[in-house]
């Protein structure tokens, strides 16, 4: 068996089942053994594998621990085994939280404001995972699969006119390849686990994706809904860019539209554009883009939100898309299967949420003196 101290020989009793022909060693479970690695080495391999490409992880383990692994595939198998076990534990907890059989008692005072942010990002996949899926590739096919990310954090003391600050170490994350309904189940379980029902105010922030607001309307109709301000501003600039050819001062138009947007005054935005007397075809294209603002008008009262001291941007979840997915899964030349990437994404999301006990059921591979006594 490979360990952090080098290979060791481990002898134990092995039992066979006459009925099924299978076998097992009860001592393995007691020591947390699985595969051909000790718990300590398996934890080191999984930590390295979830942070960097497997080949580099093998080099790191060899340089730091002096342990020579036979191939990157052995480290990859360990990552998949540990990540899959972590997902199984998280799934059990999710079901128990959703059906009420597990009650969480979050520590500390109830948060003043509880935020739930949602977004999606694509992960590059092998062709078999995107077969028959239309996309933006030159061949008309998709080459990615969407991973939906949810970010939760709290804010204890919002104040008008003061830059909002999230509570330190309050971030937690959920991630899935699943559809909107499966993602909603993850969000609800994490909402329960974090005790967000105790918050004085719940706020949901996202971009203009309809699936986000369908979940929000169905599961948290009492929450304040905010479309990410910077995402909305991108739509403003997209309109201005289409009109730039006929404008002498496009920046001035962008400022007028952005000022109206900040107040949530979508009608004034439309009036400013109407005053340009656009030709019918161009006017129709711009009016179609204005549907985005009309559809989300009730989520765009940014002046009011900031008067409450709330966040108006989804930077936290956009950062999570980069740190949980992009930094590990979207490096040059990478192509994944859902089966191969799910354990990695699960471990990264749990690790960044401070929930390492779900990844490694033995936080320390060593037995302390108190336990030994």
Image (cartoon, rainbow, N blue to C red):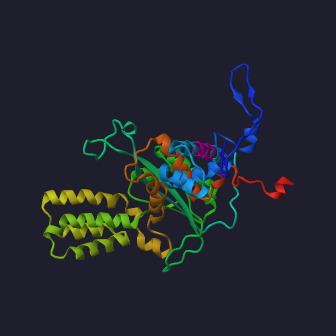
Residue at (60% x, 45% y) in the render: 82
Residue 329 is left or right of residue 8, and the answer is left
Residue 263 is left or right of residue 8, and the answer is left
Looking at the picture, how far across and down is residue 188, in whole percent?
A: 57, 51
Work out which quarter of the rendered image holds the C terminus and state it: bottom right
**Which span of residues is magenta-colored?**
81-91
Nearer to the camera, 283 or 372: 372
Q: Is residue 99 visible?
A: no
Work out which quarter of the rendered image holds the N terminus and state it: top right
Nearer to the camera, 168 or 188: 168
Looking at the picture, how far across and down is residue 74, in whole percent?
A: 55, 42
**Quadrant hosting residue 256:** bottom left
Residue 310 is left or right of residue 278, and the answer is right
The relative height of residue 249 versus residue 345 in the rendered view (above or below) is: below
Nearer to the camera, 31 or 315: 31
Residue 80 falls within the magenta-colored stretch: no
Looking at the picture, how far across and down is residue 118, in whole percent?
A: 47, 56
Residue at (59% x, 65% y) in the render: 170
Residue 251 is left or right of residue 164, and the answer is left
**Quadrant hosting residue 255:** bottom left
The relative height of residue 143 versus residue 212 in the rendered view (above or below) is: above
Residue at (74% x, 54% y) in the render: 366
**Residue furthest toward the top?**
19
> Magenta region, mostly helix, strand or loop?
helix
Residue 86 falls within the magenta-colored stretch: yes
Residue at (37% x, 49% y) in the render: 333
């Amino acid at each position: 068996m490979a360990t952090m101290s080098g290979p060791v020989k481990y002898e134990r009793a092995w039992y066979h089942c006459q009925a099924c022909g299978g076998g097992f060693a009860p001592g393995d479970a007691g020591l947390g053994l699985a595969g051909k690695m000790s718990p300590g080495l398996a934890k080191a391999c999984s930590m390295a594998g979830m942070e960097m490409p497997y080949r580099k992880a093998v080099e790191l383990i060899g340089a730091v621990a002096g342990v020579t692994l036979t191939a990157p595939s052995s480290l990859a198998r360990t990552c998949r085994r540990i990540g899959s076990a972590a997902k199984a534990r998280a799934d059990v907890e999710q079901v128990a939280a959703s059906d009420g059989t597990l009650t969480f008692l979050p520590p500390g005072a109830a948060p003043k404001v509880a935020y739930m942010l949602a977004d999606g990002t694509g992960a590059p996949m092998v062709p078999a995972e995107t077969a028959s899926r239309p996309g933006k590739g030159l061949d008309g096919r998709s080459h990615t699969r969407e991973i939906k990310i949810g970010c939760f954090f709290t804010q204890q003391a919002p104040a008008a006119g003061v830059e909002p600050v999230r509570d330190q170490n309050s971030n937690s994350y959920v991630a899935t390849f699943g559809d909107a309904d499966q993602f909603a189940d993850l969000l609800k379980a994490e909402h329960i686990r974090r005790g967000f029902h105790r918050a004085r105010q719940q706020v949901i922030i996202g971009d203009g994706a309809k699936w986000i607001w369908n979940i929000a309307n169905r599961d948290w109709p009492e929450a304040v809904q905010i479309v990410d301000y910077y995402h909305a501003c991108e739509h403003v600039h997209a309109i201005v860019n289409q009109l730039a050819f006929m404008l002498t001062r496009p920046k001035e138009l962008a400022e007028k539209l952005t000022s109206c947007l900040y107040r949530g005054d979508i009608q004034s935005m439309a009036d400013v554009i109407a005053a340009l007397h656009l030709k019918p075809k161009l006017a129709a294209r711009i009016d179609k883009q204005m549907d985005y603002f009309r559809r989300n008008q009730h989520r765009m009262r940014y002046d009011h939100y900031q008067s409450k001291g709330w966040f108006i941007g989804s930077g936290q979840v956009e950062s999570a898309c980069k740190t949980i997915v992009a930094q590990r899964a979207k490096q040059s030349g990478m192509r994944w299967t859902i089966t191969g990437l799910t354990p990695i994404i699960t471990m990264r999301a749990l690790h960044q949420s401070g929930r390492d006990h779900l990844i490694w059921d033995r936080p320390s591979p060593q037995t302390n003196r108190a336990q030994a006594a």
